[in-house]
Image: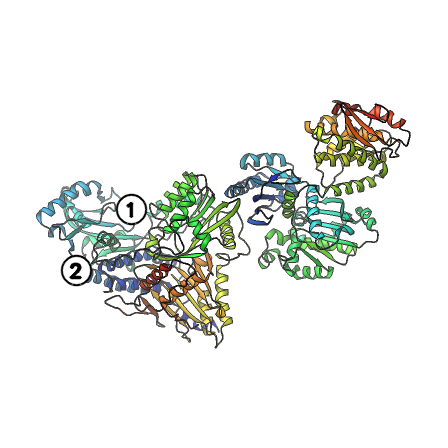
Amino acid sequence: MKANEFEHEIFLNRELSWLQFNDRVLDEAGCKANSLLDRLKFIAICSSNLDEFFMVRMAGLRQLVKIKRDTPDFTGLTLRQQLIQARAHIERMLKRQYRYLNQEILPALEKHGICLRRPNELSGTAQQALKKFFDTQVFPILTPIAVDPSHPFPILRNGAIEIAVSMKSAAKPETVYAFVEVPEVLPRFIPADEDSSTHTYVLLEQLIMDNLPSLFTNCCIDQFFPFRIIRDMDFSIDETGVSDLLHSIEKNLLERRTREPIQLQIPVGVRGKLATWLHNQFDLAAEFRYRVGQPLHLQQFMALAEREASNPKLTEPTWPPLKVPGVSNDLPVIDSIKDNSPFCIMLPFHSFDPVVRLINEAAEDPNVLAIKQTLYRVSGNSPVVRALQRAAENGKQVTVIVELKARFDEGNNIIWAQRLEESGAHVIYGISGLKIHCKALLIIRKESGIIQRYVHLSTGNYNDKTATLYTDIGIMSCDAKLCEDISALFNIMTGYSSPMSNWHKIAVAPFNLREKSLALIDRETRLSTPENPGHITAKMNSLVDEEIIRHLYEAAHAGVKIDLIVRGICCLKPGYLTNNIRVISIIDRFLEHSRIFRFKNGGNPEYYLSSADWMPRNLDARIEILFPVSNEHSCRLLDEILAIQLEDHEKARALRFNGRYVRKFFTNHTPARSQWRTYQMLQKYGETDTLGAAPPKLTVYTGVD
Amino acid sequence: MHTTTHGVRFSLPVQIGIIDIGAYSIRLEIFQVDNKNRCKILEQLSQPLNLGYDVFRKGVISPPKVNLLCSILKEFSHKLKEYGIKHHRTIATSAIRESFNRDILISRVMFETGLKIEVLEAQEEARMLFVLMREVMQQQYDFTESNAFIFAVGTGSLIIMFSENGKLRCAETEALGTVRFFDELGRTDVNPAKIIDLMESFELTTRFADALSQRNGKALKIIGLGAGLRALISIRNNYQKNKIVELAPEHLLAIMEQIQDEPPERLAVKYHIPDHVAISMAPSGHILNYFVKKFNCHNVIFPLISTRDALIADMFREEPDPFDDDIIASTIAIGEKFRFERCHAESVVRNSIKIFNCIQKTFGLSNRLRILLRVAALLHDVGRFVDTRKHHKHSHYLVSNMHLPGISEREMQVIAVAVRYHRKAIPSTSHPEYTSLYPNDKVQVCQLAAILRVADALDRAHMDKFAKMNVSRREDTLLVRAPLLSDLALEKLYLKKKSNLFREVYGLNVKTNGEL
């Protein structure tokens, strides 16, 4: 099979595929089966995603255009074509987003007493209370900045809502321009309840705009409107010759304020001199100027959704986290690992508590000698970090490998990393040139004089907040060979040792993960016969890697059945000369985040979990791991989860040969909804509370084997 | 509780750390020995650091390399803490051994990392390798019946050992390391012809002619040790399973042909081996092959052990030290080189040991001192090879320049000075060879020389009259009684002359038959 002949037939453009993913997120905002506040959350997520897309991907594309590298990608699109198509896509997406918000969600919320009002629509007493709030809470922290020859154009903060104002002062005849930044330290939604039956809010920028005269005294305000500027935040540090990564990232963070703008958002319908002046101030090509609906900055509607989350009519009930079977509440977690190793923790259906407990108990356990952990993104007041601090204070050898380069979290990371260092932990700030993305915890313990090691490996971060929102799978194990591998992995990450030549159980990027993944795919191709066709089921966040896609296609042509569950970007276009590849994407209340790989292996299936997607950056430029799950009950659980997902007809969309995703919309949730079925399955399974028992058979595996 | 030949006491289970500072890499191995004496490796770390380049070219380790060494050792020391390791050794081989600034370096490492570097002398390395090699070989061959040449091909040096009937007869170290070739000949100039030229210039076969003449018709075994050779063998054999691999010379050549066109960097990737080992593969093969051809051997044996394995085994070996007999065997080999009078030497050994055993407990003499005494007694007269007049001084000069596997350089000096005092003057502050010793070593010299003088006096006639003597202690007297068969007048005379030091050191008068 000559790959070149069908290049354009098997690949989808990465950026356009990402936009389709965000479309799917937006679909959830329009899905009437979802609760109103969940729909509002999807509006916010869609916006936040889009901002990030501009900051990183669009910025990257523009950078490439600037350096004239406008060669077509493997789908045949030039960079300029990608920019044009992306813009058209984004404009459609924005229109749809505001339609859902302003025509469906907000009016529906109003029926439940949650209203957004302009200050002048409120009663007199409410207006007075609001004025008082402005004078005492808002006014003191506002800093209007005038732009004139003596005040150069200010640095406007990335993503913040700014109010542009034009005015004339009594003293001078010419127009004066100014900016007022809407402070992010204050809530965007200011309660302005008129009676107890409603929850009325006023947007902060509305309140400020209504009070502009008190900011610019002796001036006649001409025109004003809110706008946002998004900057190029593509974060890459040239690490060659960087001796102090920490210092260099701190410096880079400061520089971000001055990064080049990549998108200007001005409300639809704003015309006149002020808008023209603003356009002229930013040296931004027309294709990066957007007219958007109002209100701006929809990401912040997440705060409103969370504020109102207590209303049971507006939100889907929470699914209480389940107890992890095999983990006893009365015994230390380490004892449960010893008794039941290895076992899986399926977040967020299962509770994250055993992981936090494991670290907490290790911190106090006199037999624990050392704790090692990778930390990528942790929550603000992370119990994991606190436990590690305590462990270091208790004299344990605590080694924490902190990835400072976790995008948009760098500032947060520096603060707690320094805090850990102060308590005596050995903090290592990543490896130059490689982002550390694997999630691993290693505990070294001395038991009756013998060293025993325990590991927790996961597809998701050690973050107690995302542990309730992302679907991730972790394993806890005391398997000697696996522990040995993880020990060696930490030695590489801490720079103690050169990479090991052969790993017992895991595969590690950038050393052999690509090689291992390709070998597993190729083995399916080799073993596949018409009587006993191969079968690959792979679940991941993104499928981008060209080489992997080619090998998958080769496998499909050899008769291997391939089921791909890809939440986000999928550059593989299914259906070219074979119907053996099926791609679905699931978007639901929890962010699908686990990476599961199942290879039929001629009838002796192998299961792997991984921190890595099949993307070039994960396979070549990060430290990632692929680890096997081999005990029967865990494999059956994984089988069940994959089967449930492949049978989802509600939240799963199927990718078609034309590159579009298709789904059915329901007005109520159906029994086919995979996340709910998974929860139910785990709930039933947990009732037995014995790991030896097989998970209840809720489904029939839909694969060919 | 587990007490080893080193006097270290372990209670099992135990975790032990070994840091090995080689010429081209620094390695840490942490292992655990459980109650059933099963050994399990917990950590194996390796960091490349080319100390050899500095030492073999300039004689010293440069300041940037010292800094790097300190930072690697700091990390390793941290690693030892992670496992709560109490027993650990930091061993340095050829690079640090040969570097001029080694003492400064050792002191700096001690200050910065708390790790005490022990420089493993070549003879000590030879001893440890030999003992483990013999233990491994003994599982498959009757090694006590064989004569063998053992080549430990390292990156910085080549250790050549000859063993006769399973006992080590001699060991020599040459500056012929595999990676050293690259430093000395230049990276592009290492080829089989150059290596053979270099080997020829050392005239090794001539120097070992004496050893070769000892073959007594027995087939000579060639035994190869070293990481480069192990890597070579691993291409053909899954050596995880075997402890010994035996190859015909043509098979060794076939393996070498297989790798001859592959650059080391490709070998490293292809066979999953560290780069510094990959570089060593071809030169190791050429060195060994040179000897295989020279000695016309039919097969080569590779016990798959490393210096680290030897070191670990050594830490756990219980008394009696199996190498004691090898020390004696190689001492006798050296004695023969100087045409010593073996019967007299052995008679003095017997006499000395009987006296030693009688007073050992009372004076707290160590078992190690007994071995030094045996060596001193064997070699006390080698100076006669130069001249009978002042032969004690010639003995001192010769012994102080000898290298014996299993005997450290410091111990060798103690033996040399003890030998110097086996006759004539007793230790004095006017003797620089004595005054230059460490205080503890001076004590040992006196303890040894005192016994040696008495033992020598008892065989004054070189007739081994005291072969069946009885030694006992009565209050302030040491009584040495020979069976009343011959005239002891001469011995009595010399005993009177030479027991003065014994009296000074042990406070005992030495008396023999009829003197009480």
* B478 lies above or below A439: above
Chain letter behind tag 1: A
Chain letter behind tag 2: A
Residue under circle 2? A107
Q: Position of residue B443 (x, y in %)?
A: 71, 27
Q: Amino acid at mark 1?
A: Ile
Q: Position of residue B124 (x, y in %)?
A: 69, 41
Task: Classify residue B122 as left or right of residue A613.
Answer: right
Q: Check contact, mark 2 vs mark 1: CB within 8 A.
A: no
Which label sits on residue B429? none
Residue A2 visible, this angle: yes
Residue found 35% across the figure and 61% down from its top: A682
Residue found 49% across the figure and 65% down from its top: A520
- Specify which label sits upstream in the sequence, 2 or 1: 2
Pointer 2: residues within 10 angstroms few (<14), some, or many (20+)? Answer: some
* B168 lies above or below A699: above
Task: Classify residue A392 as left or right of residue B219.
Answer: left
Q: Position of residue A472 (x, y in %)?
A: 38, 57
Closer to us: A167 or A382: A382
Real-space CA distance between mark 2 and mark 1, rounded to the nearest whole angstrom: 37 Å
Q: Position of residue B477 (x, y in %)?
A: 78, 24
Residue under circle 1? A155
Number of callouts: 2
- Asked if badges 2 and 1 are on one and the same chain, I answer yes
Considering the image in quadrants, where does the C terminus of chain A appear?
Answer: bottom left
Closer to us: A437 or B302: B302
> Element under label 1?
loop
Task: Classify residue A428 as left or right of residue A221.
Answer: right
Q: Amino acid at mark 2?
A: Pro
> Element under label 2?
helix
Closer to us: B101 or B223: B223
